[in-house]
Image (spheres, rainbow, N blue to C red):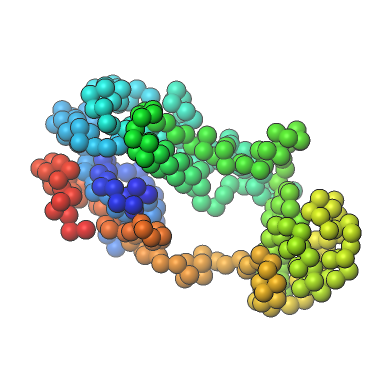
Amino acid sequence: MILGDYGANVIKVERPGTGDDSRGWGPPFDDRGESAYYLCTNRNKLSVAADLGAPADQALLRALIADADVVLENFLPGTLERRGLDPEAFLREHPSLLWCTITGFGPESRRPGYDFVVQAESGWMSVTGEADGSPMKVGMALADVLTGKDAALQILAALAGGRRGTRRLYVSLQQSATAALINVAQNFLVAGAAPKRWGNAHPNLVPYQLFAAADRPIVIAVGNDAQWNACARALGLGAFAADARLVTNAGRLTHREELVAALTAVLATNTAAHWVAILEPAGVPCGVVKPVPEALAAVDASALTGIAPLAPATVRRPPPRLDEHGARIRTLGWEAFRDDPA
C-alpha cells in the first residue's frame, strides 16, 4: 500500500474463494461486506484471484512477473518452488526484477509470522505494561506495520540504487520488531541490566510520563534540561527549578519519586486544558490523552480508504473486492491500469 500511495501500480494476487485472510477479520464489516481490517491496508491496488497450482494461473503469474519491477510475497520457504514458481529462476530470467520476501523469523524459518507472537518474542511485551502488571502488547499490529515500512524502504533503496546491489530482498517481523527496541536494547547492551516495565513512565527521562489532571490524563515529555526548568516554573515549582539536584536529567532520574510526586500533586488541582494552556507557551512538550474518535477528527480519514497519506502520496483507488479486476488483468496484464478510471 505504501508503494501504491506513492504511485506504483500494484496487482494484489489472492487465493480464489477466500482471498486475503484479513477479509474475514471482523466485524466490523462495511456495506460491501469488507472487513475494516482488510480496508486499512489495501487501497491503491487491483485484485486478481489465482490458484498457484493451476497451470493457467501459473502462466498468468509468469506473464505478470515478466513485466514487473518488484514482486513482494510472504510465503513460507519452499511453497513457491514446489509449484514451479522459483524466485531464483525468475531473477535469472529477468535481470531487472527485484524480489522481496517478508518472513516471520527469517528466510530459513518455517514458523508463520504473526504480529502478536513477534511482539512476545522480540522483547516488546516484557517492557510494555505497568511495572507490577502482566506483559502487554501494543494496541496495534505495530510489528506488522514496521515490517511493511522496512520492506518499502528496502525496495525503494534498491530501485534508487539502480538495482546494482542484492536483488533478492528479505525482511522479517522478528528483525524489524527487535530493531525497534532502540534505546531499550541499547540500555541493556551498555549497562547489562535487563529492562523492566515502566508503565507510562520513561526509563531514561524524567519527567516523561502520564499524569492525572483534574478531569482527564495528560502527558508531559521533558526532553532536555531547559524544558525541565520551564516546566517547573510554569507549574509553580520554582524551588524545584532551582534545586541543584534536579538541574540535569541524571539528577532527575536519581530523584524520580520525589519529583514525580510533586508534579502529581500540582497537576491534580486543575484541568488538562488548563495545564496545556500554561505548558505549551512555555515550550514544554505535553498533550492530553485523546480517544481514537477525537484523534481521527484531526486528520483526513475515510471509512473506505483509511487515513490519507501525506503528500505527495495520494489515494487513487479504493481497496478492491476479491478478483474485482481479474478479467481485465487476465486480458490486458499490466495494461489493465491503462483503462482503470483511477
Q: Position of residue 146 (x, y in %)?
A: 49, 44
Q: Position of residue 30 (x, y in %)?
A: 33, 61
Closest to the observer, 321 or 43:
43
Based on the displayed image, in which of its 4 quarters is residue 218 positioned?
bottom right
Q: Quadrant of the C terminus?
A: bottom left
The residue located at (54%, 39%) in the rendering is 177
Based on the displayed image, in which of its 4 quarters is residue 48 positioned?
top left
The residue located at (77%, 76%) in the rendering is 269
The residue located at (72%, 68%) in the rendering is 212
Q: Is residue 73 visible?
A: no
Q: Position of residue 249 (x, y in %)?
A: 79, 54
Q: Is residue 162 visible?
A: yes
Using residue 81 as the reference point, say whether residue 101 is left or right of it.
Answer: right
Based on the displayed image, in which of its 4 quarters is residue 308 positioned?
bottom left
User: With respect to residue 307, does 105 lie above or below?
Assistant: above
Using residue 221 as the reference point, say whether residue 149 is left or right of it.
Answer: left
The residue located at (41%, 35%) in the rendering is 102
Closest to the observer, 259 or 238:
238
User: With respect to residue 306, does 68 lie above or below?
Assistant: above
Return the residue found at the far left.
Answer: 331
User: With respect to residue 179, does 141 lie above or below?
Assistant: below
Using residue 138 as the reference point, say whether residue 89 is left or right of it.
Answer: left
| Number of numbered markers | 0
